[in-house]
Amino acid sequence: TMSRQVKDKKAPVTKINHQSLLSFVFSTAILLSLFPSQCTATLQHNKGYTNNAKSKFLLTPPSVIRLSHLPITKNKYTQTCASTRSLYKLRGGGVVGKSKKKNGAVIPSQQGGISAQSRRRLTLLLVSTALFNDTLQLTMLLPIIPTLIASPPPLGVSANAEIAMGVFFASKDICQLTFAPLAGILTARTSSNAALALSTACLGLATFVFADATSFKQLLVARSIQGAASAAVLCGGLSLIAETHAMEARGSAMGMAYTGLALGVLCGPLIGGLLFEKLGRRQTFRLAASIVVANAIAQVALMTLAPAVKSSIDNKQQGSNNKEESVSAADSFKAISTNSDVLVVAAAIFCINAVMGVIKPLSQIVLDREFQMSMVQRSFVITIATFTYLVGTPIAGYLSDRMPRSRLLGASLLLAALSSIFFALRTLLGLGSFLVCVSLLGLSLAFNGSVAQALLADLVDRHKLGKYSMAFALSDMADSLGLIIGPILGLAVSQAFGASFGVGLVGTFCLLLAPMVLKIP
């Protein structure tokens, strides 16, 4: 160690000998090797200081000796430790320092013991869980609702059970389509965190209504609330990911979020059927609602204790400027709805979901009439599409950070068109052709989900369109319209000319739209 210079009236100033200087250099080298992050060397200009100015080294842990009263020369650069700044905490706390810039994205330092990267991961985890809960509540009803509708009134219906079931499942898409713009406005005027937490809480409330419903009207109301909450979950969750992730990392983040959604689609019917058989209706939905409410509480806790870190984009490197704070929701929606690139992406989302909307009901008819499959076998065939969707979603997100996203979205349209072609070839190639059809459809939906949303966020930045939430609201509207109009148009054509013509018509739209998507820079 190095002794202080002690100045006394009787004793002269002690000079530093070579042995003490060598000891000081050796101990400093050890500290720099043991604590590189706390002892990062910086250069501070001491302009205006006198020869008697002081330079202090405050090192973590506190057992390290404080060195002070070292003489410095006026107008010289002095090598000091970065932790001398008062913004650094000494005893194991987080570091509240200046933000660093990496690849054009501003990355703040640690705060409150949780780094910015860790908070982004927590945010992504909660968004993925919210999307998982959303689709889980929607799909776990598939094996349960036929039993509820077949029960005696007032919970069930005595006549037109098939029509009642169709109205029940269509009510979700209709309400989601209607509420999507309102969800975008809600997210824009409050915050992505607040919209996500509120919509998740509403989803839990709707699930509690399913548990205690006593009439079919109450079931219908609960399903409608699910549709409205689902629109807000998508707008809030995807906006939060777009705000907290830089352009070059959005694809992977969207892929992980949609992986949670795919897990809900895959597990929902199985979990719903097993719990309904073991626990009954009330306990099944109460348990599911409790999980959703716990997710909402976790979102509020994260928003309070470790708020998400927004990522700003360097205009020179990215060529974009986010006017999130200055553009109103109405002006943003007007700009988004008149942008040609955004409309092409929305049309792609519509066409791909329309293909799924046509194949989904026709597949049950085809597998039953043409291949004489039982209900269990038909369910297994449809599960293939869900499995490829689950596997393809993170892969699509990974590729979208390393390839042009417009090309991947164009590939998604081509996969949907190929799916319709293999659907028509089932009469020649048999069941194998149909299995290829549903597999390609799952991959198409995987690339459409994560890639299209990341591309929309990029277009908002690139064209200075303002609010992410309004772009995702438009995407949600296109999604719902595809699931509503696709089956109506496809089934009408199929009834007149055959099942292959109905699917082929919608697949042709995908094929024609692909060149337009590829033109998006």
Image (spheres, grey):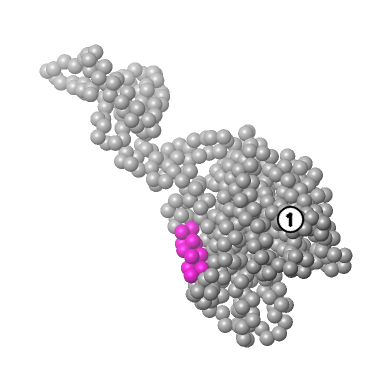
Instruction: Please give the name of the residue rendered at 31% of the width and 32% of the height, measured from the top-left corner.
Output: 58
- Residue 73 appears at what percent x and percent y? 34, 17
Q: Quadrant of residue 17?
A: top left
Mark 1 surroundings within 10 Å by alpha-carbon count, few (fewer than 14), some (14 through 19), many (20 or more) = few
Which residue has dot 1 on it?
Answer: 432
Instruction: Please give the name of the residue rendered at 48% of the width and 43% of the height, measured from the top-left corner.
Output: 117
Instruction: Please give the name of the residue rendered at 64% of the width and 43% of the height, measured from the top-left corner.
Output: 400
Seen as rendered, the residue at the extreme right is 497
Decide which of 47, 119 is in the foreground and name it.
119
Instruction: Please give the name of the residue rendered at 48% of the width and 40% of the height, measured from the top-left corner.
Output: 108
Q: In the displayed structure, does residue 342 sit left or right of residue 79?
A: right
Q: Main secondary structure of the magenta part?
A: helix
Q: Is residue 134 visible?
A: no
Q: Is residue 149 magenta?
A: no
Q: Three-letter amino acid code at disc 1?
A: Gly
Q: How many dots with numbers?
A: 1
Decide which of 42, 35 is in the foreground and name it.
35
Question: Which quadrant is home to the N terminus?
Answer: top left
- Residue 113 appears at what percent x and percent y? 39, 45
- Residue 285 appears at what percent x and percent y? 52, 72
Q: Which residues are magenta?
A: 287-300
- At numbered mark 1, what does the secondary structure look like: helix, strand or loop? helix
